Image: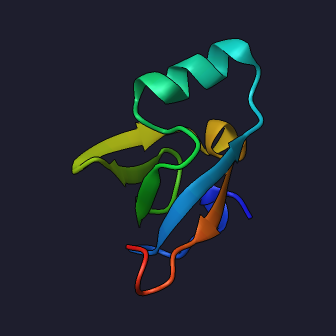
Amino acid sequence: MTVTELKPHECAIVSDVTAQDQETERLKSMGVCVGRTVQLIKKGDPLILKVFGSRIGVSARLADYVHVVPCTPTTC
């Protein structure tokens, strides 16, 4: 599933980023990379994500490249 499919306030672990090189670098610079826990704060365009305690805005188009696995209660 992608970040855009999460429900508000749902946490997930990034499993893959399928964006092209420049877009992957942009996501990494914002802290969105494989193995990282993210939380969807607000749906829309841009989506608001919580990463490392900071909130960031990510376009829905870019967020579609971020594949995640929802967290279980013990992993978040």
> Residue 68 occupies which quadrant of the picture?
bottom right
Residue extending furthest toward the left: 53
Q: Which residue is painted at 42% across and 87% down in the image?
A: 73
Q: Identify the coloring.
A: rainbow
Q: Position of residue 67 (x, y in %)?
A: 70, 53
* Front one among 67 and 36: 36
Q: Which residue is painted at 64% across and 67% down in the image?
A: 69
* Front one among 43 and 73: 73
Q: Position of residue 8 (x, y in %)?
A: 44, 73
* Front one among 14 and 57: 14
Q: Position of residue 11 (x, y in %)?
A: 45, 70
Quarter of the figure that contains the N terminus? bottom right
Q: Which residue is painted at 45% across and 75% down in the image?
A: 10
> Residue 25 occupies which quadrant of the picture?
top right
Q: How many marks?
A: 0
18 vs 22, left or right, is right
Q: Which residue is painted at 41% across and 34% down in the image?
A: 31
Q: Position of residue 60 (x, y in %)?
A: 62, 45
Quarter of the figure that contains the C terminus? bottom left
Residue extending furthest toward the bottom: 73
Vertical relation: 62 (above or below) 23: below
